[in-house]
Amino acid sequence: MDAHPIYDLRSDTVTRPTPAMRAAMLAAEVDDAAYGDDPVVCALEAEVAALLGKPAAIWVPTGTMANQIGVAVHTRRGDTLACVPGAHVRIHEDASAAALWGVQAMPIGDRRGFTVHALAALLDEVACGWPPIGLVWLENTLGEAGGAIWPLTGCHDGRDGLSEVAAFARAQGCAVHLDGARLWNAHVATGIGMDRWAQAGDTVSVSLSKGLGAPAGSLLAGSTEIIARARRLAHGLGGAMRQAPAMLAAAGRYALAHHIDRLADDHRRARRLAAGIADLPHWDVPEPETNLICCRVRAPIERAELLCVALRAAGIRCNPNIAREVRLAVHLDLDDTAIDAVIERVHHTLGSDPGRFAPITS
Ligand SMILES: *Cc1c(COP(=O)(O)O)cnc(C)c1O
């Protein structure tokens, strides 16, 4: 046993495949996935399509590729897509919607979602000469909002439900994509089926390498025609990975069978971690809805990075979410003992002389 282990809370992507998952990967029958007849990849695609209630799905190496294909299949050069300001596609994909497809992101609402009214107001401006909205972009859970769940129905503090927004968007002739990299977390936290959430999107992307703990892989689901186009786009983007997808798909199938329900443990541990560090000075710790905790720093801590440096020195790897928020991600590789140790180290770090968090001025 490592006497002073380092706890990695940077993201839920940092998990390592478990021994049982590695065994499933090793045992996978492999073939050339680019020819489309790899049995394990085909089985995973069929499984996820069925889970999401869509006719077809394609495995791709990353969520970013799934999302970028989602942009490409619904838009034309010079279109825009409407999304929340902190959407992954807008702030964490290196402006690829613009760089690859000539599509500009139009932020509406706030970090926790938007209303039908806000979308209608944007569409009104299109009628006055603003560029066309080819695509309405939804995300659940909302990463930049600390894993907040965008509810499926009803009006909730400044946003409408995903299903109402989607129905309105379609009635206006817009396509809808749901970035569901962490849709599993929304499903487990609410008990609402993956297929019901997925109804909101004409296409839906889901990740196997976040909370589910696979080393790589995402799927894009949608109609048979759209997924046929997606296969050509994935190939063109360099996604034809030959014998590798079979092993990664085996990890994905293992994760679907064993790592969905246990997300409830991550959510419980995230709440316990938040409760254990909420009474410390110099930051505001929200009650997490799922597995992410985004803590807003206060004076004298000017920037989240200053606190992250101190936490890293104490053996807690973490990063800023935004400039003034520290993000702590709870995942498969953190058990109750680890959470206790993290709480203790955070106390030790934040409880000490706050002056050391002040930026160095000369
Ligand atoms: C992680 C994530 C992605 C991208 O997934 P990668 O596999 O890291 O490319 C897309 N959307 C959301 C909401 C994410 O959290």
Image (spheres, rainbow, N blue to C red):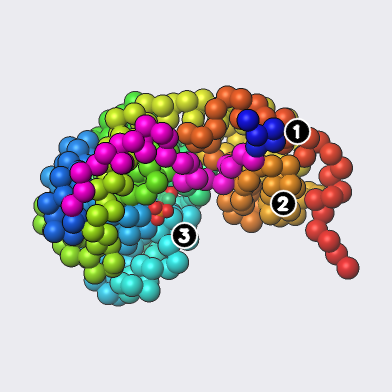
Real-space CA distance between mark 2 and mark 3, rounded to the nearest whole angstrom: 22 Å
Please tell me which residue lies in front, 156 or 303.
Answer: 303
Image coords of residue 32 (percent x, y): 18, 56
Q: Are marks 2 and 3 in contact (CB under 8 Å)?
A: no
Tell me the amino acid under the disc marked 3: His
Q: Is mark 3 within 8 Å of ligand 1?
A: yes
Q: Position of residue 146 (x, y in %)?
A: 52, 43
Marks 1/3: CA distance?
Answer: 31 Å
Query: Can you identify the residue that label 2 sits on?
Result: 309
* Within-10-Å neighbours for mark 3: few <14, some 14–19, many 20+: few
Q: Which mark is residue 211?
A: none
Q: Amino acid at mark 1?
A: His
Q: Is residue 30 magenta?
A: yes
- Residue at image position (34%, 29%) is 258
The residue that disc 1 covers is 347
For residue 92, which numbered disc appears in the image? Answer: 3
Disc 2 or 3, which lies upstream in sequence? 3
When the figure is inspected, residue 268 is found, relative to residue 29, above or below; the finding is above
- Name the N-terminal-most of marks 1 and 3: 3
